[in-house]
Image: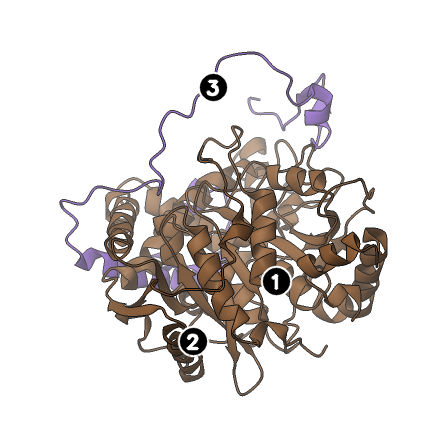
């Protein structure tokens, strides 16, 4: 098998026995990119050639276009940041470089991570490796597609409402959003600061644990980073779930759930039961309100975070042809109007509305209170359950263009993933089947804060008893 | 709650985004649709519920006030659109 098809742990074994060198693997992956990326468009551009400095994990990796990386153009998929070359490395990029990581390219994403399909990127969409007429999911669609298409061995993405897990599910790979505060956000271009979290997209659960070992840990440069020592996540790769209790929320199996997704997830539940897990039906009564609360809280934070893009310091600056108000304000308005795409404008305006005088109590404050209820629902369930199991997405990958004219239907594709961001808890998507059309289906596991090891253990046990993760798309 | 084109213009001005007149109806319809969906939050009784601004209860992430190396001045200005005398240059604010 060519090196580009392998997982990181398989490659590490080959390095140990000197069967292949990191440079050979990098060249093989780069050749793969040249061969297939014209079809997939997972990358915005290739990264500068790595130095092949010594390190324990010389693994080819894709980096999402919102992670600051010295020497690369990093734009968040937006015209407004075209030409921006960060003067510093994000904490995770620093860690990847220190571990010997080989950055292959900068992966495509929805503009400012606003989307679930990677269609709102100013560079055009990424295509799903399993069916080129479909979206890869989003917003980390490029990161998921590059891993699924073997254009990287693993990738980093960010997840504000499902942006790692939903594309992982659509592309048939593993994706995890760690606990809020587990991975430093220093150098991540912010969308919604109280929800954003960086995490791994990998070919299997073992790689997910390995990549977590590299990126997790306290960082004083991120004031929300939590000072709790990071464990060795590979110790959680235990093929045994006997005695663990997995909760199935009744709210998850409702109208709008694709019957094929339902069937695959129910089959997975049956298998987990057979493997010794106790299955318990529970209720998360406020999760039906999660999407509404999220689109208030997240857009409010986004409107504030994106106020910094004003043409004053860096990025795009557009001087207006004629003066409407005054030279400075006109320049700011013109820059933002031409620099942001439609979805960014919609979200900035929605957030501005939710925070504006007279509407703050009715929207933003209510959104934050519902967040308390959703967190409370999880706290109650985790009293006597180890994890919550749901589908990752209500459908398989949808067609390119199918939801672009209806923003609300796009928002609803994150119905299962959003609650974990609001509650700050970790969640992981693992492949659990294919539709009749051959599209991947993912199941989501959610655990209490800092219990990533529980997710890895259950997902690993499930994966080792199934073969979904071994199937590759024909590109 | 329906949203008028006047509301959209007002929010756009607050957000420093210029919406051309021909696009006002579209933004009205789209934002109106989302706000209508969000209205379901009004059904909940939230009188005794405290708001959550952060999932992890962290406060006062402070460090000792010690000067240490940071981004070099020239390095910080390298990406500027326009600069003069070591500062970012913007259009004239006061005539």
A249 or A43: nearer the eye?
A249
Query: Does dot 2 land on a helix, a strand or a loop?
Result: helix
Q: Which residue is mark 1?
A: A144
Residue A268 marker? 2
> From the viewer's perspective, is the residue at label 3 or at label 2 nearer?
2
In the displayed structure, would residue B86 be above or below residue A274?
above
In the displayed structure, would residue B45 be above or below residue A174?
above
Measure the C-alpha gap from mark 1 to mark 3: 37 Å
Point 65% across, 47% down: residue: A75
Q: Give left or right: position of A376 versus A390.
A: left
B72 or A437: nearer the eye?
A437
Query: Does dot 1 land on a helix, a strand or a loop?
Result: helix
In the displayed orientation, state which residue is furthest to the top.
B66
Q: Are marks 3 and 2 on the same chain?
A: no
Q: Which residue is mark 3?
A: B63
Q: Alpha-carbon neighbours of circle 3 within 10 Å: few (<14), some, or many (≥20)? A: few
Q: Give left or right: position of B35 versus A396.
A: left
Residue A114 marker? none
Measure the C-alpha gap from mark 3 to mark 2: 47 Å
Letter of the chain in brown: A
Q: Alpha-carbon neighbours of circle 1 within 10 Å: few (<14), some, or many (≥20)? A: many
Q: Quadrant of the N terminus of chain B?
A: bottom left
Letter of the chain in purple: B
* Percent coordinates x, y for residue A13 in the rendering: 73, 57
Point 80% across, 68% down: residue: A2
Q: Tell me, yes or no, if residue B67 can be seen here.
A: yes
Q: Are marks 2 and 1 on the same chain?
A: yes
Q: Alpha-carbon neighbours of circle 2 within 10 Å: few (<14), some, or many (≥20)? A: some
User: Hey, which quadrant is residue A418 in on the image?
Assistant: bottom left
Q: Give left or right: position of A408 versus A209.
A: left
């Amino acid at each position: 098998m060519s090196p580009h098809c392998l997982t990181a742990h398989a490659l590490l074994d080959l390095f140990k026995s000197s069967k292949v060198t990191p440079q050979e693997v990098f060249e093989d992956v780069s050749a793969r990119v040249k061969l297939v990326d014209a079809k997939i468009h997972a990358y915005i551009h290739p990264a500068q050639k790595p130095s092949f400095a010594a390190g324990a994990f010389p693994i080819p990796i894709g980096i999402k276009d919102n992670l600051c990386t010295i020497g690369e153009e990093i734009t968040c998929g937006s015209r407004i940041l075209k030409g921006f070359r960060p003067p510093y490395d994000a904490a995770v990029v620093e860690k990847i470089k220190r571990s010997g990581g080989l950055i292959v390219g900068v992966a495509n994403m929805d503009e400012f991570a606003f989307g679930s399909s990677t269609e709102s990127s100013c560079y055009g969409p990424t295509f799903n490796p399993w069916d080129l007429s479909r979206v890869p999911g989003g917003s980390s669609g490029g990161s998921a597609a590059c891993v699924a298409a073997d254009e990287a061995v693993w990738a980093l993405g960010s997840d504000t409402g499902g942006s790692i897990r939903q594309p992982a599910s659509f592309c048939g790979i593993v994706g995890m959003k760690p606990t809020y505060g587990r991975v430093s956000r220093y150098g991540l271009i912010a969308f919604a600061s109280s929800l954003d979290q960086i995490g791994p997209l990998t070919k299997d659960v073992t790689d997910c644990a390995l990549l977590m070992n590299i990126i997790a840990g306290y960082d004083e440069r991120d004031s929300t980073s939590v000072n709790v020592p990071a464990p060795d996540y590979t110790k959680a790769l235990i093929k045994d779930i006997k005695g663990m209790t997995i909760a199935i929320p009744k709210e998850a199996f409702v109208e709008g759930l694709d019957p094929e997704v339902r069937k695959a997830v129910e089959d997975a539940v049956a298998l987990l039961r057979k493997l010794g897990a106790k299955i318990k039906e529970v209720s998360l009564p406020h999760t039906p309100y999660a999407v509404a609360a999220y689109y208030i809280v997240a857009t409010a934070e986004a409107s504030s975070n994106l106020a910094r893009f004003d043409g004053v310091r860096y990025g795009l600056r557009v001087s207006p042809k004629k003066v409407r108000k005054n030279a400075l304000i006109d320049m700011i308005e013109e820059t933002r109007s031409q620099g942001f795409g439609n979805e960014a404008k919609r979200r900035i305006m929605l957030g501005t509305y939710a925070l504006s005088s007279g509407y703050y109590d009715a929207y933003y404050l209510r959104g934050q209170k519902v967040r308390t209820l959703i967190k409370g629902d999880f706290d109650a369930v985790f009293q006597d359950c180890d994890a919550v199991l749901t589908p990752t997405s209500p459908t398989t990958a949808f067609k390119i263009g199918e939801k672009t004219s209806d923003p609300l239907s796009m928002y609803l594709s994150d119905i299962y993933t959003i609650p974990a961001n609001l509650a700050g808890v970790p969640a992981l998507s693992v492949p659990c089947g294919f539709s009749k059309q051959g599209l991947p289906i993912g199941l989501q596991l959610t655990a209490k804060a800092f219990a990533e090891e529980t997710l890895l253990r259950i997902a690993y046990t499930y994966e080792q008893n199934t073969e979904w993760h071994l199937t590759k798309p024909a590109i | 709650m329906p949203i008028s084109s006047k509301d959209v213009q007002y929010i756009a001005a607050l957000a420093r985004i210029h919406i051309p007149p021909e696009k006002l109806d579209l933004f009205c319809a789209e934002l109106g649709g989302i706000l209508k969906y969000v209205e379901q939050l009004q059904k909940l009784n939230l009188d005794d519920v405290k708001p959550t601004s952060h999932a992890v209860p962290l406060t006062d992430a402070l460090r000792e006030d010690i000067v240490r190396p940071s981004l070099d001045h020239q390095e910080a200005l390298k990406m500027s659109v326009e600069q003069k005398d070591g500062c970012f240059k913007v259009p004239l604010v006061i005539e």
